[in-house]
């Protein structure tokens, strides 16, 4: 259940609000003022993925730690986006942690190279906008669940498409 029903009756804790806002906005990437926040958030997520891959995952972006990272960020994202969600603005534009997880899912099992990450960026953005194959229905789930899982659904579709291309033409 979203916090929106109790929001007006209870003052939110400023420390908890700061933590939720930081997570939900993809560490501030959703607050970029010049272009669409989801686009900037998606790019920031790929940059973070690349930096983590070269510094922690040893060039094997599909290590068990990457899957753990996706799971942890998904759980934190459900909480954080639910926290910033409200009746007047369901799925606020500044909340881009869902784009982070969605594009990470899109590039799973692909080589961690810029051509594949750029392909992942465009495929994910297109699928996130179009929301095909029932993804739009997922968006209607309550609070943070719908906010996060519609992008995960788009990411799964993107991963299937890009991995099929990779296997068919580059493996």
Image (spheres, grey):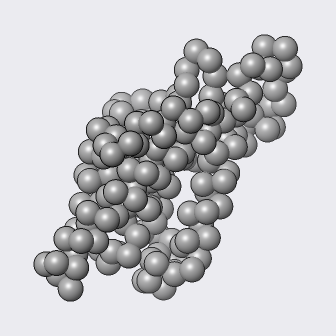
Residue 110 in sight from this viewpoint: yes
Residue that lies at the very extreme toward the left in this rendered image: 169
Image-based side of 123 in relation to 152, left or right = left
Image-based side of 40 in relation to 127, left or right = right
Image-based side of 78 in relation to 154, left or right = right
Q: Which residue is rendered at x = 78% and y = 14% of the image?
A: 8
Residue 96 in sight from this viewpoint: no
Query: In the rendering, at what x and y percent does residue 100 appear?
Result: 48, 52
> Residue 137's image quarter?
top left
Image-based side of 64 in relation to 162, left or right = right
Q: Nearer the viewer, residue 53 or 63?
A: 63
Q: In which quadrant will I find the C terminus?
A: bottom left
Q: Nearer the viewer, residue 156 or 13?
A: 156
Q: Which residue is rendered at x = 34% and y = 64% of the image?
A: 159
Query: In the rendering, at what x and y percent does residue 42 appear?
Result: 40, 49
Query: In the rendering, at what x and y percent does residue 163 appear?
Result: 28, 71
Q: Nearer the viewer, residue 86 or 1?
A: 1
Query: In the rendering, at what x and y percent does residue 119 appear?
Result: 24, 60
Q: Which residue is rendered at x = 84% and y = 20% of the image?
A: 11
Q: Which residue is rendered at x = 61% and y = 70% of the image?
A: 68
Q: In which quadrant will I find the N terminus?
A: top right
What is the number of callouts on the image?
A: 0
């Amino acid at each position: 259940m979203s916090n929106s029903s109790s929001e007006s009756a209870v003052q939110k804790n400023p420390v908890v609000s700061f933590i939720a806002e930081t997570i939900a906005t993809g560490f501030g990437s959703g607050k970029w003022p010049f272009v669409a926040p989801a686009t900037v958030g998606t790019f920031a997520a790929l940059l973070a993925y690349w930096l983590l891959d070269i510094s922690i995952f040893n060039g094997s972006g599909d290590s068990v730690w990457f899957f753990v990272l996706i799971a942890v960020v998904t759980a934190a994202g459900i909480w954080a986006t639910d926290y910033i969600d409200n009746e007047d603005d369901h799925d606020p534009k500044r909340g881009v942690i869902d784009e982070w997880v969605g594009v990470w899912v899109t590039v799973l099992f692909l080589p961690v190279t810029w051509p594949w990450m750029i392909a992942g960026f465009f495929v994910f953005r297109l699928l996130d906008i179009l929301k095909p194959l029932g993804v739009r229905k997922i968006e209607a789930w309550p609070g943070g669940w719908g906010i996060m899982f519609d992008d995960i659904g788009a990411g799964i579709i993107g991963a299937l498409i890009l991995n099929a291309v990779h296997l068919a033409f580059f493996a």
